[in-house]
Image (cartoon, rainbow, N blue to C red):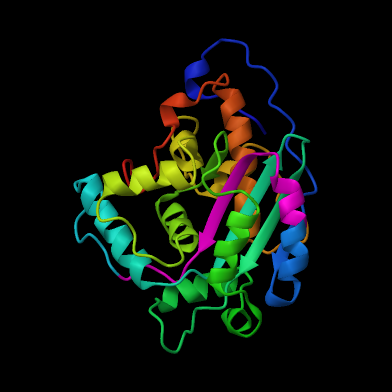
Amino acid sequence: MYRPPYFYGGMPVLLPPPVVVGVEVRPVWANNLSFELGIMQQVAFDALYVAVNVHYPGVIHRAGQDQASITAEQRYAAVKANVDELKPLQVGLAVYNARGQLVSWEINLSDFDAATDGHTARSLSYIAGRGLVVEDLRRHGVPAAALTHALAYCGLVARPGLTWITYSGAYHVAYLLKVITGGAPLPPNIFAFLATVRHLLAAHIFDVARMATDFYRGPVGLDDVASLLGIPPPLRSPLLAGAASVRALDSFMVLRHLFGGDVSTYMGLLQGLQVT
């Protein structure tokens, strides 16, 4: 059920915009990469919004202090240490274009090897519980380098006017930058990181988790927020990166409406970096 933000008081609230129902997440493996890349290019050439979610194998470096008391630079240092060392497992992208199409892809990456690459057992157990078989990634997935090419080929990199959306996005955006740059280390400090985000993605980037804290003062997991907003899960999809990208994009659309269309105060704020 939809509820207005607490600060609406007695003001009338417009009905929220309809979300796209029946979105099917398209899994991408090595054997269908070329086919799906063709579809992605057709959908993305007039893209307006792109949401990203990344599954990764855990967090092995921490700032070592209470999150509320450390600086944004210290938080970024921990993000950089993890992203530079670890390999992403799966990238979910939801693309909404000027023709009203919303299509999602779940790109399964093959670079991670649980026998030799850094990870936490807890994280692998978590994603296994949501339907991801890590062994299948290694056998049938797509090299991250192929995704680097795909994103550039489809025109989703350094594209003026595009709006990017994420949820608790510090790690999601950082891993996406790692893919876009071909595995290069992240920039040395948070200021250089944010400048790179603005250059390679967009100045218009929004974190639904940050927006949700001004709408709902309870648990703000993505599933909680989407459920509260009445957003259904995508069709026939495990609760993995592709589904999360769709729910993040839909949640952004509804929250933006509930905030009266002006979400400029949230632009560029990533949960886990500048805000906690």
Q: Is residue 47 visible to the viewer in this orientation of the structure?
A: yes
From the viewer's perspective, tell me whether residue 180 is left or right of residue 162: left
Residue 179: percent from the left, percent from the top? 49, 63
Q: Residue at x 25, y 56 (%)?
A: 188
* In the image, residue 197 lies in the stretch drawn in magenta: no
Q: Quadrant of residue 133?
A: bottom right
Above or below for 264 versus 94: above
Q: Nearer the viewer, residue 179 or 92?
A: 179
Quadrant where the image shows the N terminus: top right
Quadrant where the image shows the C terminus: top left
- The extreme bottom residue here reads 115
Q: Quadrant of residue 269?
A: top left
From the viewer's perspective, tell me whether residue 28 is left or right of residue 175: right
Above or below for 78 versus 89: above
Q: Residue at x 52, y 21 (%)?
A: 262
Q: Residue at x 62, y 33 (%)?
A: 253
Above or below for 42 versus 122: above
Q: Is residue 68 visible to the viewer in this orientation of the structure?
A: no
From the viewer's perspective, tell me whether residue 251 is left or right of residue 206: right
Residue 213: percent from the left, percent from the top? 44, 35
The residue segment tinted magenta is 39-60
